[in-house]
Image (tube, rainbow, N blue to C red):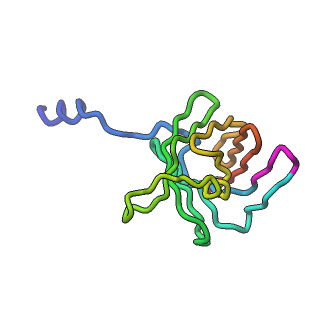
């Protein structure tokens, strides 16, 4: 009985992201100026769980990134992305060009969640929109 009380009193970290949680393949980046970058044949992914997003280029042409995020209603806010390199202390990103490949805006980014379901996600910001397919 004591063990049951102990277990039920422990607070366990769990993800409450719902459809947001998962492994997302970036399909396309569109700008408000009418330009589009097709990513369907690229192996670029956003892995979302808990309060973290890991952004990876599985073609190994760009650095992996990691960022904390907050979901506020229909907004997804990425806060202070870092280069995912534990051997070097996960350095903070100072060059915004590193972010551009993944469709991120400089430093802290707020995206409007246009579409989010079990297999599709579309995010929009002031100057671009991102389209994903869930794996």
Q: Nearer the viewer, residue 131 or 6?
A: 131
Q: Is residue 98 left or right of residue 40?
A: left
> Is 126 left or right of 70, judged from the image as shown?
right
Q: In the drawing, does residue 83 fall left or right of residue 37? A: left
In front: 99, or 50? 99
For the N terminus, give its image quadrant: top left
The C terminus, quarter of image? bottom right
Q: Where is residue 105 in the image (x, y as percent from the top left)?
A: 65, 45
Residue 91: x and y in percent read 44, 56
Question: From this viewpoint, which residue is outermost toward the front?
Answer: 94
Depth order, front residue of 33/44: 33
User: Magenta stretch containing residue 33, yes or no?
Assistant: yes
Residue 3 vs 86, above or below: the answer is above
Q: Where is 80 relative to 23, above or below?
A: above
User: Residue at left 72%, top 40%?
Assistant: 124
Q: Does the magenta stretch include residue 110?
A: no
Write the residue at 42% across / 57% down. Answer: 90
Asked if residue 78 lies left or right of residue 41, the reply is: left
Q: What stretch is highlighted in magenta?
A: 29-34
- In the displayed orientation, state which residue is furthest to the top: 73
Name the image quarter holding residue 75. Answer: top right
As drawn, 1 above or below 41: above
Q: Image quadrant of residue 122?
A: top right
């Amino acid at each position: 009985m004591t063990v049951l009380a102990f277990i039920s009193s422990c607070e366990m970290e769990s993800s409450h992201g719902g459809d947001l949680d998962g492994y997302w393949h970036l399909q396309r980046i569109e700008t408000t100026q009418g330009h589009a970058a097709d990513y369907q044949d690229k192996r670029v992914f956003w892995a979302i769980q808990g309060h973290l997003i890991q952004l990876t280029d599985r073609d190994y042409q760009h650095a992996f990134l990691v960022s904390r995020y907050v979901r506020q209603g229909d907004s997804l806010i990425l806060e202070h992305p870092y280069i995912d390199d534990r051997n070097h202390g996960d350095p903070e990103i100072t060059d915004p060009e590193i972010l551009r490949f993944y469709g991120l805006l400089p430093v802290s980014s707020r995206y409007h969640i246009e579409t989010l379901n079990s297999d599709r996600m579309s995010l929009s910001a002031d100057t671009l929109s991102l389209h994903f397919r869930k794996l």
